[in-house]
Image: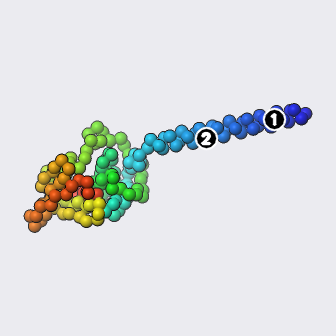
Amino acid sequence: MRWERLFEELEARGEDLELEERDLLVDELRDGDWAQTSWRDLLGGRVSLDVQGAGRVQGVVVLVNERLVHLRGDAVDHVVAARAVTTVHATGRRADEPTTVGAALGWGHVLRALRDAGDEVRVRLVDGESRDGTVDVVGRDFVRLRSASGRDQVVPFGVVAVVSGRS
């Protein structure tokens, strides 16, 4: 009788240990999956982002890659430097994987398209300042904006937080 009770207790402990080990393994696998996930992978649908120097911007995610997040707003589109995003407040669904072309897009591609469209843009910088104008020249690591007064301003890509233009 005593042996039977002892074996029953040992079996119960063994089952408990197996369950604990299984749960730990599941948690480790979950942690491993999360360890491979970027915050950019979570963006999709309508989002609200806090951006260094620009405050909060909102819109529907159009494109996400390592460098940029393109949001389509109700009246204004925003292209955000991924490095300037400080907080993601809402996300509707996980983003679609970017195409090969979408993954390669950077500030040069975006600003050349805006130059070709000839639209006025607002470039908000990581220090909170902003520059308004039309894109005149796009260099390797800078954009030259022409203001309404005809004055040129050269802005290095490294200080750009958000570029906004009409949708």
Farthest right residue in view: 1
Q: Nearer the viewer, residue 155 or 133?
A: 155
Q: Is disc 2 placed on a helix, strand or loop?
A: helix
As drawn, is 66 to the left or to the right of 13? left
Q: Residues within 10 Å of mark 1 (few under 14, many from 20)?
A: few
Give the colouring mode of the picture: rainbow
As drawn, is 133 to the left or to the right of 18? left
Q: Residues within 10 Å of mark 2 (few under 14, many from 20)?
A: few
From this viewpoint, is residue 26 visible? yes
As drawn, is 5 to the left or to the right of 20? right
Q: Identify the residue at horizontal 90%, vertical 33% (top origin).
A: 1
As drawn, is 146 to the left or to the right of 54? left
Looking at the picture, does residue 18 appear above or below residue 70? above
x, y percentage for residue 83?
A: 33, 52
**Residue that label 1 marks:** 8
Q: Identify the residue at horizontal 62%, vertical 40% (top origin).
A: 23
**Residue that label 2 marks:** 24
From this viewpoint, is residue 75 visible? no
Q: Earlier in the sequence, mark 1 or mark 2?
A: 1
Farthest bottom residue in view: 149
Q: Is disc 1 placed on a helix, strand or loop?
A: helix
In the rendered image, which quarter is residue 102 located in? top left
Q: How many marks?
A: 2
Q: Quadrant of the C terminus?
A: bottom left
